Image: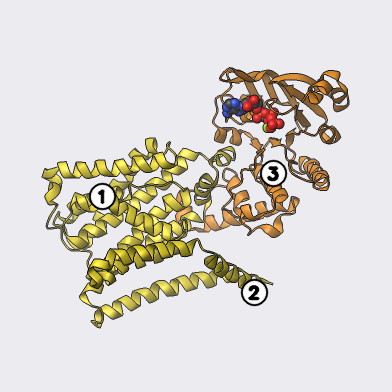
Amino acid sequence: MKKYGKQILYMVIAVGAYAAVMLLVNMGLLSRQMTSLIIPVCMNIILAVSLCLVVGFLGELSLGHAAFMSIGAYSGALVLKSGLPVVVSLPLAVLVGGCCAAVLGFVVGIPVLRLKGDYLAIVTLAFGEIIKSVFNAATPITGGAGGMKKIPAVTTYKNFTFVYILMLLVILLVSYLVNSRHGRAICAIRDNYIAAETIGIKVSRFKTMAFVISAFMAGMGGVIYAGNIGILKPVNFDYNTSIEILVMVVLGGMGNITGSIIAALLLTVLPEMLRGLSNYRMLVYAVVLIAMMLFNNSPMKRILVEKKNMRQAAKIQ
Amino acid sequence: MTLLEVKNLGISFGGLRAVDGLNMSIEKGALVGLIGPNGAGKTTVFNLLTGMYLPSGGSIKLEGTELVGKSPARISQEGVARTFQNIRLFSQMTVMDNVKAALHNKIKYNLAASFLHTPEYRRKEREMNERAREILQVFELEQYVDYKASNLPYGKQRKLEIARALATDPKLLLLDEPAAGMNPNETAELMETIELIREKFGVTILLIEHDMKLVGGICEYLYVLNFGTELAHGLPEEVLNDPQVITAYLGE
Ligand SMILES: Nc1ncnc2c1ncn2[C@@H]1O[C@H](COP(=O)(O)OP(=O)(O)OP(=O)(O)O)[C@@H](O)[C@H]1O
Ligand SMILES: [Mg+2]
């Protein structure tokens, strides 16, 4: 009974958020600036939740998420530019983008996932830069530094429904996965890979699995990006982008899907809201980041959590 | 019937022969002790048996199947489970999930079922919950199912590690100093539980313990290690009165 209550709550939030956005847009209550943020918010939620699988649940620090996003973006953009009708080209692009990213995730994952901690972070960082250089160099296909232009704008706020459903799907799949036999294996590896091995979990298989699934979803996020922005440049996928996504996961509380979603929402909207402050924008942004970080590790939060647990305990008895 | 047959097992670290020419033969259903002073090589034997180290020579046969060269995950599936001297729980996971993680190869469903929470997923998860609860009950941990493993008191963490090992449904259970850090009461209670699980789960147990008296109390057979080699083996009363064994321990 208690479990169903939670599911209903999530459903209400999902439908409510959708209805609210649709209502605000259709009644013209959102400024142009806010309207333009709708899709980036969904996209960042997809990216943050997918990275959360690797960083939060598998416990590996990956700094190459933007690279997987870029593979998805470029390969998806080629499909979008193919001239097929949008009802076909958009889902197909999302699928192709996801698959290309997943294949790359697999190829990179096999050698890279043997590394631990800092080494993995450094290698994924380097990997991201290599991918960026490749896109820069492959001018005939990607347009090089000048960018791949004239990508049909198929994932603007007018196609919010499609993007929103995709986002819900990513959230649902990751949440379901984490609460399963496979998800437990992934978390067990994070907590103690030696113990995980000795209870029969094939560590490298599950590491690769988490990495590939995460890459697939990042690739889909990349396609949304391509169809939203209309032009792809390799500089848009440098390590800064990877780190921005990582910050969302870290602020969300590592391995907390709801936290990642909220952080993605705030960190997408906040910089734009602060645009009016021009010079102080990045300063305020940094201060807010630090404040959130401090809160996440503060006694204040512990007290709040403990209070919640007490209430919960009282209810059960 | 012999369950485990170890022949001429050895490993060195640099110049140090941590285990040298070890022979062991363990009967099915036995409760055997592996004792020896600090640094004798007891934990190293466990690391060899579970495939964490590759021996420099020798063989390990479980019911005739060679284990040397197999990965730890594979050896777990062959039926060897262990606990660790320095506890290695899945600290951020709940007590329940620690045990369920160990049911990984016992109750299975595919990735699609994980992603979609199909009826099969729900059925198998229910089965897992029941099985995990059964095991946790033996260790009186059922009221802690929702605790994070790291929030359990120390003694209960040790018990949870044994519960997790048992969940893999092993033929051979290796316990590395299960009573370390416990008071005499807790230790006595734990030893009773160990005898109980041997009956209930039909498992063969090899136990490392420092305290010779304690080991003599419950083990039917003992192996004594010193400087990586076998010093003595036999029935507890013989072994514990062996002058060589006494000197090795007093020499510490
Ligand atoms: N990975 C390793 N690298 C180098 N030396 C090691 C390694 N593992 C064990 N040793 C050495 O092998 C010897 C045996 O160690 P082991 O941990 O097996 O002893 P033990 O009998 O379990 O002792 P204790 O009662 O203290 O747990 C020690 O001298 C130890 O330093
Ligand atoms: Mg030891």
Residue ID for mark 3: B162
Image mark 1: chain: A
Chain letter, orange: B
Display colour scheme = by chain
> Which colour denotes chain A?
yellow
The mark closer to the camera, 1 or 3, is 1
Q: CA distance from mark 2 to mark 3?
A: 32 Å
Chain to which mark 3 belongs:
B
Q: Is residue A160 above or below residue B178?
A: below
Quick one: B134 or B31, which is closer to the camera? Answer: B31
Residue type, mark 2 in image: Lys
Element under disc 3: helix
Query: What amino acid type should be assigned to the residue bearing mark 1?
Result: Asp
Please name the amino acid that badge 3 sits on: Ile
Residue B27 in the image: state x and y as whole percent: 76, 27
In the picture of the structure, the residue carrying the numbered disc 2 is A315
Say if A249 sits above or below A265 in the image.
above
Percent x, y of residue B61? 65, 24
Question: Viewed as shown, does residue B89 lie left or right of B177?
Answer: left
Mark 1–mark 3 distance (CA, rounded to whole Å): 47 Å
Residue at 21% from the left image edge and 57% from the top image edge: A226
Q: Chain of mark 2?
A: A
* Percent x, y of residue B196: 80, 44
Q: Residues within 10 Å of mark 1 (few under 14, many from 20)?
A: many
Q: Sequence-wise, which precedes: disc 1 or disc 2?
A: 1
State how far apart marks 1 and 2 are (Cα): 49 Å
Element under disc 1:
loop
**Is A21 situated above or below B185?**
below
Quadrant showing the N terminus of chain B: top right
- According to the picture, the residue beneath numbered tag 1 turns out to be A238
In which image quadrant can residue B169 be found? top right
